[in-house]
Amino acid sequence: MNSIQLNKQGHLKHFLGIEGLKRALLIEILDTAASFISVSEKAVKKAPLLRGKTIINLFFEHSTRTRTTFELAAKRLSADVLNFNISTSSSSKGENLIDMLRNLEAMHCDMFIVRHNAAGAPHFMAQHVAPHISIINAGDGQHEHPTQAMLDMYTIRQHKGEFAPLRVAIVGDILHSRVARSNIHALTTLGVSEVRVVGPKTLMPKGIEALGTQVFHNLKAGLRQVDVIIMLRLQRERMQGALLPSAHEYFQYYGLTEEALKVAHPDAIVMHPGPINRGVEIDSSIADCKRSVILQQVSNGIAVRMAVMAKTLGTVSEQKGTQ
Amino acid sequence: MATLSILGGRVIDPASKLDSITDLHIADGKILGTAPADFSADEQIEAKDHIVCPGLVDLSVRLPGAVHKGTILSETRAAAANGITTICCPPDTNPVIDTPVVAELLQHCAAGMAKILPLGALTQGLKGEHLAEMGILKEAGCIGVSNVQAIVNTDILRHALEYAANCELTVYLHAQDPWLGRDGCAHEGAISSRLGLSGIPEAAETIEVARLLLLIEMTGVRAHFCRLSSARAVNMVQEAQTKGLKITADVSAHHLFLTEKDISDYNSQCHVCPPLRSQNDKEGLREGLRHGSLHAICSDHQPHEADAKHSPFAMTASGISALDTLLPLTLQLAEEMQIDLMSLLGNITYKPAQILGIEAGTLAEGSTADVCIFDPNKRWTLNEENMHSLGQNSPFLGWELKGKVNYTLIDGQVVYTRPR
């Protein structure tokens, strides 16, 4: 699975999922991202690495912030960026994915950044795209969201240094979350001591233990002594109906409050992929407290996406990351 | 009188427990028998080192009604080229087989290739609301009735089964709960969770089997379970049979070879309904065949054009083009399970014929001369070029298979000869 994302030399050709990538490669991406942080902090926020490259944001699902950070990342590397929001254009005209791919290839682009509601769509595109084009997965259905996982890992490393001793809890709607799956693969690959998934049974995928996680249905039990808490967004359509009785009850049992946070390690950090639902999965005061690193995640996202783009297009020397 | 002799083959007729190297004589489209030794026929087929068995009876071949997927001619021809002489077509064609016109059209179009036995719809348009005209459908040649998908309203389901019993029609039941796994496309478990594919739990099948078993008992209808996919459902059917309920069941050949693991690279050729389940389920299905609670192996043939499978997994059409693999997979199963060949050939000849209530699938004297002659040792690799079906959607492409049909006879006429 996912071996398609590496070329014969073992370098990134596409970035489709964390599953199957080696620890050393993940560390390389984090190190490369670290070298890009300074670009965003300079007065002239540009590095010339992707000058002359054309990148297309191909979003089949609505997104503002992920698309924007990809766009910023590409522009800071001096690439030209086009945005396609397909939900409103050709897929509703019945054009199939392959035909669309051929049309975009004909425009001589170098990279597609794909978000799609079907699991495996970027994988499918990588199998069929012309060989000079790289595909980056910006979220596929309930499968993976690998750049989000990498920016989460970056943020964890920034605050905690080493991965090995960490206990990490991922809390909320695990069932529908591509962020959870990518984070589970990243955390287990980087060798943290424990990955916990916490949520009600209705939002827990079957057999998730097989990915190396411990399952908790009680929030406090799941948060006990953890060093990192990754909260997940609860989609509005899941709040009421067959999966949960109400947003109110969900907050009562799974919302991150000061009270619940007490059982975690005193230095535990709180993360969230955004956008947050205040008073649904997280208490407002926690979202804004010192332990919350939610906004740092957003800033780090740009550098991490720059690193992934530069590495897949082969413009960063392979030695750089291992320093 | 037109006569034909098949000489020196290993004649296997599971229905009469015949397995011997002998000649087989045919006259006027009927089996004459293995004697006399000095019979002089108009035509002779040399069958040394070949197996001569009844033409295969396939309980499920979808004739989609879309010419780019497969036509009646292309698919009945493909069936014949694979030794399959009788095919049963479920009613979820386009248009649905809920009027006598469609049922008659299908049978007339077969034109000397594999014989088509249509199943009529249990409810109009398969919508589960109004009973279809089952009596009239039966007169038009429908061999049984089916709704393919579940009838949600249990009261309507009960009456549909009662009315089918009243018409003395067998109902062909697909056990999938209408709600559980409704949006799913893969067996619910660790693999679907990892791939982010919506799951269809085992309970989607077992709950519907339980509901149906109770209604079958209540209505007294003659019932057949189509394409069981889980070990637990096999056990439930077996228990009911032990208690004396007269029910039968079948399994598709692909469920006996593939599991959920085979989809793990988003292989859309493995997108099938019911879904490929666990290793344990695959073994349970094989055990069901061994114990006899599963009576038939069918192809569950569903041809598609290439584009139908050329999308991300969940967006692809479900189904496998399977006429070309039914016989070789059955032969491979005999080897893997170490079951004698006669027994497994029974699962694709006289046993499905008994379920359909037709006189076919046997080489007994006086029976219709539908015959398959194949080379059991011929090794070949399935590829797009050698598939006979118009649909080339098979997860078995690239597999090395054993066993190839040399001749197929329908009503004593040679309808297929393998090109040399």
Image (cartoon, coloured by chain):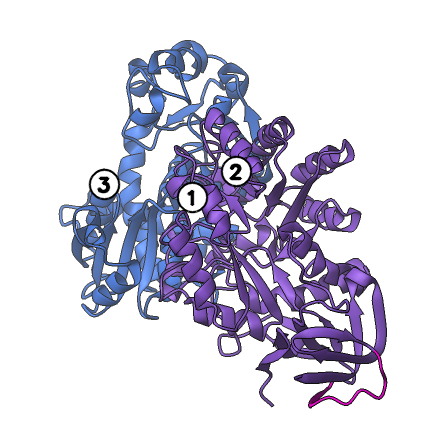
Magenta run includes residue A210: no
Between disc 2 and disc 1, the foreground one is 2
- Chain of residue at mark 2: B
In the picture, the disc for residue B20 is none
- Tag on residue A62? 3
Q: Is residue A320 visible?
A: no
Residues marked 2 and 1, same chain:
no
What's under tag 1, amino acid-wise?
His
Q: Is residue B43 visible?
A: yes
Expressed as whole percent of the image width and height from the top left, the position of residue A167 reads: 53, 29
- How many labels sit on residues? 3
Circle 1 is placed at which residue position? Answer: A143
Q: Nearer the viewer, residue A314 or B199?
A: B199
In x, y percent, where is residue B238?
73, 38
* Residue lying at 53% horizontally and 78% vertically, measured from the top left: B386
**CA distance for labels 2 and 1:** 25 Å
Ranked by sequence position, the earlier of labels 1 and 3 is 3
Q: What is the C-alpha distance between the residues marked 2 and 3?
A: 33 Å
Residue B267 drawn at (x, y percent): 49, 57
Which chain is displayed in purple in the rendered image? B
- Residue found 23% across the figure and 55% down from its top: A94
Q: Are marks 2 and 3 on the same chain?
A: no
Q: Secondary structure under badge 1? A: loop
Residue that label 2 marks: B176
Q: Nearer the viewer, residue A135 or B251?
A: B251
- Give me the residue at 49% from left, 32% from top: B180
